[in-house]
Amino acid sequence: MLLGNWSAAGAPPAYPTAAAVARAEARLRAFAFVGLFERWADSVCLFAATFGSFVTAGDLVNTRPGARARAALAGDARGGGEADAFPDVDDWADARLYAVGARLFEDRLRAAFAVD
């Protein structure tokens, strides 16, 4: 969706160009908040700090575990998910946007909870 190629009709979108990915990176950098699923607790805390809220214990509980979380709880580290359905796909655009989002997350987390 950051690339603007979402197709509700189910037709596959055109593979992104480098220019489209650069625009998506700029859009991502403009987000007020970026969280990471695999860093849920830290993301909840950063969200609260960003928007002047507070965190409760219930905010940190996964109340809707999907297949991957259920598999992890059962001891299967691989889990399941969309990425597993296409193991041979080299999605450089997703990887690049994830890297930008992860860097934003880490930088903002560090800034929000910096200890002097």
Image (tube, rainbow, N blue to C red):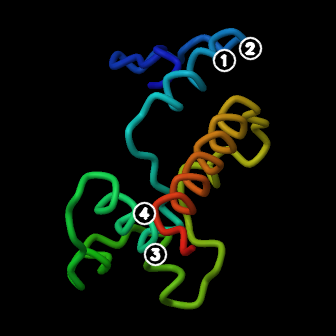
**Callout 2 crowding tier (Cα within 10 Å): few <14, some 14–19, many ≥20:** few
Task: Assign a secondary structure to mark 4.
Answer: helix
Who comes first in sequence, dot 4 or dot 1?
A: 1
Q: Is residue 91 above or below residue 50?
A: above
Determine contact: label 3, label 1, CB under 8 Å. no
Number of marks in picture: 4
Amino acid type of the residue tagged 4 in the rendering? Ser
Name the residue beneath numbered marker 3.
Answer: 69
Q: In the rendering, which numbered label is found on residue 43?
A: 4
Determine contact: label 3, label 4, CB under 8 Å. no
Q: Relative to residue 47, is residue 63 drawn left or right?
A: left
x, y percent for residue 1: 44, 25
90 or 102, which is in the foreground? 102
Quarter assignment of residue 77: bottom right
76 or 30, which is in the foreground? 30
- Please identify, in this view, whether the residue under mark 2 or under mark 4 is nearer the observer: 4
Name the residue beneath numbered marker 2.
Answer: 18
Who comes first in sequence, dot 3 or dot 4?
A: 4
Name the residue beneath numbered marker 1.
Answer: 22
Determine contact: label 1, label 2, CB under 8 Å. yes
In space, the residues marked 4 and 1 are separated at their CA atoms by 24 Å
